[in-house]
Amino acid sequence: MINALIRFSIAQKLVVLLLVGIMAAAGAYSLINLPIDAVPDVTNVQVQVLTGAPSLAPLEIERQITFPVEVAMSGLPNVEEIRSVSKFGISNVTIIFNDSTDIYFARQLILERLAAAREQIPANIGSPEMGPIATGLGEIYQYEVKAEKGSNYSATDLRTIHDWSIRRQLISVPGITEVNSHGGYGKQYEVRISPEKLQSYGLSLRDVYEAVTRNNSTVGGGYIEKGAEQYLLRGVGLVEKMDDIANIVVKTGAEGVPIYVKDLGEIVEGKGIRQGAATADGEGEIVTGMAIMLKGENSRTVAGRVAERIDEIRKTLPPGVSIEPFYDRTALVKRAIATVEKNLLEGAALVIFVLLLLLGNWRGALLVATIIPLSMLFAAILMRIFNVSGNLMSLGALDFGLIVDGAVVMVENVVRRRAEAQHHKSHEPPERTILEACLEVARPVVFAVAIIGIVYLPILSLRGIEGKMFVPMALTVIFALLGSLILSLTYVPAMLALILRGNVSEKESFLIRWAKQIYKPALAFVMKFRAQVLAIAVALVLISGAIFPFLGGEFIPRLDEGDILIETIMLPSVSLNQ
């Protein structure tokens, strides 16, 4: 099969070059649309069930909400772990599935169990809901909603503008699953009841609550026909201002006198209970927003969409209010890409320089050099197909020295055979000589590249965080090696048949001649004292094995993104003001 492939490539050179051109175009398209991030996303397949209960302490949250939800989620297929956190006002239950589970299938399983969980939670305490479809790397864009100096916007006003205007527009951006708010106060209208007035009218807080709830709705009343048209009937009772709340009737007295909410207390604009705040530059509190990316999306693309939508939203904001981004994942991704590009370009340039210096034939050296970008484009196609993202681990692990090995052997042997044929004045056609030279080393080339690829196969068996971190790296290298092997057996023979038709000169560079002068006496010495050399080699291996456990190591490469993160850890009971 290998020999037949080489024969076809030399016989149908133009067809092979056309196919390589198509592959390069497809690779360029795949590379442009390849999901790119700074580091691999190691988040497991998880679904969060969140339940808000503003009035409950952590102990009540645990007993009345968290525990029933955990019990309801037990026994689901593919579940590896269920963990929870109960805080003041909120319950967070995280259900972790094995990595082979589709996230949407997992959410469907959770959705079917939520009904059972709601039945076990006391009424009017809280309703459990699933969290957004996101990962640990989902926070791709953060911004501040800022009021200009001299304006009268309070933290509550800015939070209201964000929640009711900015957030609603950002949530519609493709690839965004959630937009969170931080800082400021949630605006709310409070009915502050006077206990004395409530008692004097013989009412309870439940009566007031039900009256306000009942009178804040719109109901339908069917329709009436008039002529050829029908008119819809409805009762509009939505509260639009504080006076509407004040004029709600709670009860009608014995003589038909209505008792209004305003008769029981005062209605004021208040602030919701909060457990967090945001400050900036030591100048006081601010209001911020955070856009969270949908799991599996391209962070670079989605962050760009958010930035474009932010520019559109700025035009609709009230005078004196602005949006100032302070974190954009695109900047980090660009820095990571720049690092990868620098390393790849420097590596490619070094390999090309060495090839030109040592191969002894500039045409063959340039041909081998073209294997580097073509193998990268081939790898990009498979990365796109197998959903492998480009990052510091996957792209940064490429070794161009390994990629060009097969092509170097193929070109070196063909140049040697063509030079020998010219030296002996052979009448054999050049294509025949090139074909025999390629067939001579085809099998060793396949085995050499296969052995390099086999080294990476054990990495594919890794699971969990290790698998998410290192499997993309192994796959990228294997894809590039596979591309270089296919190109070495097809593209290289076809190009050699085109560029080595004329006179071919094979000469050793001065480096090779200099290296041989050192290598020959060293080889003679080693062959004379074989036993001693072997003993020294074995001793060095044993010493290396003994030293290895004491070497330092890192799980992931250091990511210097140019930002400083400072964290302060305090007691869980610390107050927000403190």
Image: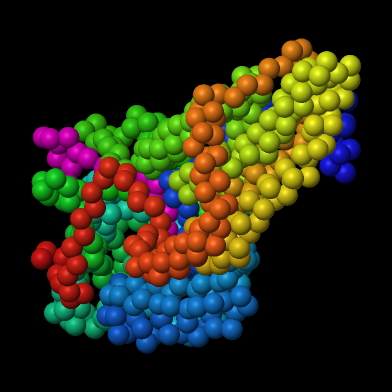
* Image quadrant in which you'd find residue 307: top left
- The span picked out in magenta is 136-155
243 lies above or below 349: below
Q: Is residue 230 left or right of residue 145?
A: right
At horizontal 17% and vertical 47% (from top left) the residue drawn is 280
Q: Is residue 138 magenta?
A: yes
* Image quadrant in which you'd find residue 60: bottom left
> Which of 248 and 456 lies nearest the eye of the viewer?
456
Tell me the quadrant of the picture where the N terminus can be found: top right
114 lies above or below 387: below
The spot of residue 201 in percent (x, y) is 22, 80
> Which of 166 and 571 lies nearest the eye of the viewer?
571
> Which of 30 and 421 lies nearest the eye of the viewer?
421
At horizontal 37% and vertical 31% (from top left) the residue drawn is 311
At horizontal 19% and vertical 67% (from top left) the residue drawn is 569
Looking at this view, name the residue that lies furthest to the front: 528
382 lies above or below 277: above
Res. 275 visible in picture: yes
* Image quadrant in which you'd find residue 365: top right
Tell me the quadrant of the picture where the C terminus can be found: bottom left
The spot of residue 526 in percent (x, y) is 53, 51
Q: Is residue 44 magenta?
A: no
The spot of residue 227 in percent (x, y) is 67, 42
Q: Is residue 514 left or right of residue 186?
A: right
Res. 391 visible in picture: no
Q: Is residue 300 left or right of residue 424?
A: left
The spot of residue 78 in percent (x, y) is 61, 75
At horizontal 70% and vertical 51% (from top left) the residue drawn is 450
> Which of 268 and 236 lies nearest the eye of the viewer?
268
Q: Is residue 371 left or right of residue 493?
A: left
